[in-house]
Image (spheres, rainbow, N blue to C red):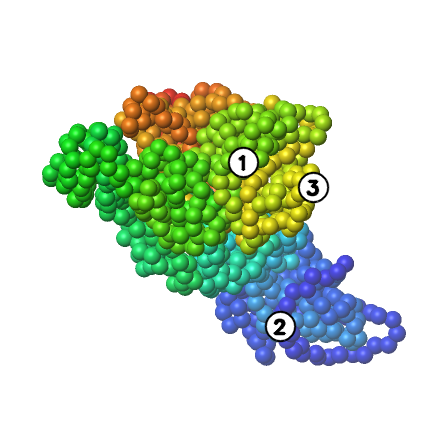
Amino acid sequence: MIKKVKSFKKLLLTLLAVTLLTGAANALAVTVSCNGTNSPANQIYNSTGIGGTLLSASKFVQIIQSTDTTPGAPDPATGIPAGDSVASTGTLATAGNFSASVNITTSNHVYIRAWETWNGTGTPTGKYGTSELKNVGTGFTYTFKPASFATTIDMPVQATLTTIAPNSRGQGAQSQSLTLTGSNFQSGATVQISGSGITINSTTVNTATQITINVNIDTAAATGARNVTVTNPSAEASNTATFTINAGPLATSANPATADQGFTGNVVLTGTNFHSGAWAATNAVFSGSGITVNSVTFNSATQLTVNVAIAAGATAGARTVTLTNPDDAGILTSSAILTINTVSTAPTITRLEQTSAPGVPITSASIGDGISIIGSNFGATQGTSTIAINGTAVTAFYYWSAGKIDIAVPTGATSGNVVVTVNSVASNGQPLTINSAPPALSVSTNSLPNGTVGVTFNQTLQASGGTAPYTSWAITVGSLPAGLSLNTSTGMISGTPTTAQTANFTVQVTDSAAMTAIKALSIVIDPAGVVTNPNISGINPATAYLGQSIIISGANFGASKGASTVSIGGVSALPATWSDTSISVAVPSGVASGAAQVVVSVAGKTGSSSISVDTSRTYLEDFEGGCVGNWTIDNNSDGNPDSGYYAFGTGVDPNNSTITANGPQAEAAKEGARGMKIKYSYTSDWGGGWGAALANQINLSSADKINLYVKWDGSSNDVKIGLKDADGTSFAASVTNATLAALSGYGQVSLDKSSFAYDKDGSDTGADASFDWTKVGSYNLVYTTKGTTANYQYIDSIFASTGSTPPPPPPPPTGDEPVITAIDPVIGPAGTKMTITGYNFRDKDTSTTRKVQFISAANVIVEASIISWESTRIVLTVPAALGTGAYDVKVLVEFPSASDPSIIRSFYSNPAAFTVTATAPPPGTIIAYPTPFNPNSGNPLKVEFDPGSATNIGVYLFDMTAKLVKRDNISVGQFTWDGRDTYGMPVGDGVFLVRIVNNENQSLIAKGKILVVKK
């Protein structure tokens, strides 16, 4: 048996009367003596210790024989010493005194054990004391007088374990205090926990019924139940209690996964084993420095929302996050799930754009305009960042991202630099010109022509500046000549003079803003038969390119040209049309850039005005009436010189006899008021085409390219474009069908001048085959026969340009035709609400018909439903009947002629391209575009619906788990969404549900789905 050793004091033994023996071992008579009369006294004490209280009389004593030098521990059940034998027993005769004799085998050891409460029967209990141990030697007798000892050793008792609190902790929990309750806990007791991964740092026996331990739980400790036991000194382990290791909180991803330096906002953590409870900012700690956790919100066992502030100087790179569950102190650290991006200390602006026309750079804007600032390092959110335009702070912000910001130009802004300031660091300045308010209202007519008694007089007063349209005219001082009257609505002075006189008067004009302007004028009425000076009252347009048509309006030009002349900038020009009040003429080659005087000479008398000439572009043809003249040869072999446009071959519509009258049409206009409308359907032989002579030879010697606008008919034909010089030599270049088919809507075709080569078939007999670019006199288009189509094609603005990129189109006309400057949107489903901006749309008081038409490639016209109509702005609904595809949008206005109200004048606007992406949805559903929606594009999602009569409208967006993502209140049937939730965090990919209700009665207005795809 292995002895259980208990410590005791080794006291010196006194050996007396030792007799040496030889031979085999023999029993030796040993006298044991513990008495106060011994010298030194060696009495036995109780648990008070040596020098305390003597052990009481009659207490049980064992005399024990041992073969070695180590006393055996008493057996818990019998009290027999382990590995030793009890030679004799007895009791104390008196307190502290014991004496007895016993036989001990020679050379063995002897010691005594006294018990404080046990009497030698039954299970040993209480305290005991063990004397020193001494070898008895080999003599005949031996007196054993051990030194004094006390009964201070507890008999081993098995502990009982009742509870452990808390009875669970999480993986990674550190320095956790656990309290064990039970009974029979002894000093020196130890605690054991099964399995690995738990370190017991300390054990404190507080009382016989309570033990406190401090533990660390490894992050990789296996989860589940563990057995806990308590073992008293020299005793068996107690019964077991259960302690559970819970799985720790582990974050596996963060949304957003990246954040800029200086970011403040929510980061949503997804993971496992998040426990509900009082989550504090300290329960989430990101690695490194520079990230402050403001709050932690428990959403579910797999999701937390952490509000963080990232310092502007936080170190860039990947970060981990350590989470601590608030209930069981479980603590785990994630992998690197959040990356801090470096934000340059200097935000950079690269360009400015009009918000409604993405991708088109701008350098000017008006107060209130929406503009987009494109650049980098603006930060993911605005935060404390600011924007100023020439020092004026921007207050209206619609969108903010690291690369794009949408704002409105603030009131009071002046021309200067746009500057974005992020984290107190200013960007570069991007120049922006703030458009000035319209010029002051004025009467622009400076003089009126002479009239003649008995001859009809018609002149219209002109105004400029102010706010168009001009609502009324009046004579405030003086009077008109006898026989003449003023139309107060149009400003026309008309009638037949009856008396030769000079009339002086003052006219006043009133604009739409109720502002007025006056001017003193006079009219001289000559006697009958007197030729009066020609008078120019206006020129349209006031700025024109070389070769472009201008209309000279006035009086006394004569019914026909005859010997009369027109010169522009000192260069003679041959007019295309001539009447007493109007002349159509193209600006001739040779006119210098800038201001040019326009002079009309009639019978030796002249009238003059001026225009501004732009020489960066030279028109061959603009289809506005001033470019085409008369041929001097018979192109179509009918025996007569041709006049105006001509057609040749078969299958051309309009044909040769009708092309001059029916070819140029308002519906075919790309620029200005008219373009050429042509259909070619001949499918055999060599082909056919059309052309025209120019009223004036033009000089294209410095041009690099020949350009024209084409809206193709969809056929498989090619087109050959030919030019003729003064001696009839033709040079031509071809445009392939692939180029034509690739055009989107009304597109531009550009040909290098070097691609034009000698065309023998198109040249006149006797031509020298050498092309004189200074004397271009005509053009034609020849169709190479490959197929036929029922569709018309449109041609507009044939012009020459210098450089690789043609200059911008000419300025918009200032006449009566409506002009579209922009549409918003340019793409969307049928049923979309659209806004058209421009001018000359007129109002209901000044027009008889106002329409917006959508024209398909097959020339099918569908009229739009108008929501509101102003002279510069139209709001409409894209027709629900439209199928998908490209359409031209045109504005049509009709109104009575000022000179003869019985005549109705019709004008089409220039076309604007719109693409229908989907057919109209049924009632009660939404229209959402673009779809799918990419929030990273920088362009918001637009949603439209029919609100009926509701004006208090609630918009709800849900994800597919029915979680509310965004809520808003609106008052109209449309809204935009930037792809962020209520907290400003970007949503993920997926399908989102839209529900729109009337807040007044919670009735459903519309519903639908939105697909979000970021790529």
What's the mark number on residue 760? 3
In the rendered view, tell whether residue 644 sits above or below residue 358: above
Query: Where residue 982 appears, x then y in whole percent?
Result: 42, 41
Quadrant where the C terminus is found in the figure? top right
Q: Which residue is mark 1?
A: 631
For badge 2, the amino acid type reads Lys
- Give how far apart the Cα atoms at labels 3 and 1 are: 20 Å
| Mark whose residue sits in front, 2 or 1 | 1
- Which of 135 and 783 lies nearest the eye of the viewer? 783
Q: Quadrant of the N terminus?
A: bottom right
Q: Quadrant of residue 272?
A: top right
Write down the quadrant of residue 895 in the picture.
top left
Residue that badge 2 annotates:
9
Residue positioned 71% across, 73% down in the render: 134
Foreground: disc 3 or disc 1: 1
SS class, disc 3: loop
Q: Is residue 786 visible?
A: yes
Going by the numbered disc 1, the residue's amino acid type is Trp
User: Who is closer to the viewer here, 333 or 132?
Assistant: 333
Q: Look at label 3 and name its amino acid.
A: Lys
| Mark positioned earlier in the residue sequence (3 or 1) | 1
The answer to whether residue 804 is above or below residue 504 is below
Give the left or right position of residue 802, taking residue 787 as reference.
Answer: left
Where is residue 418, by image quadrant?
bottom left
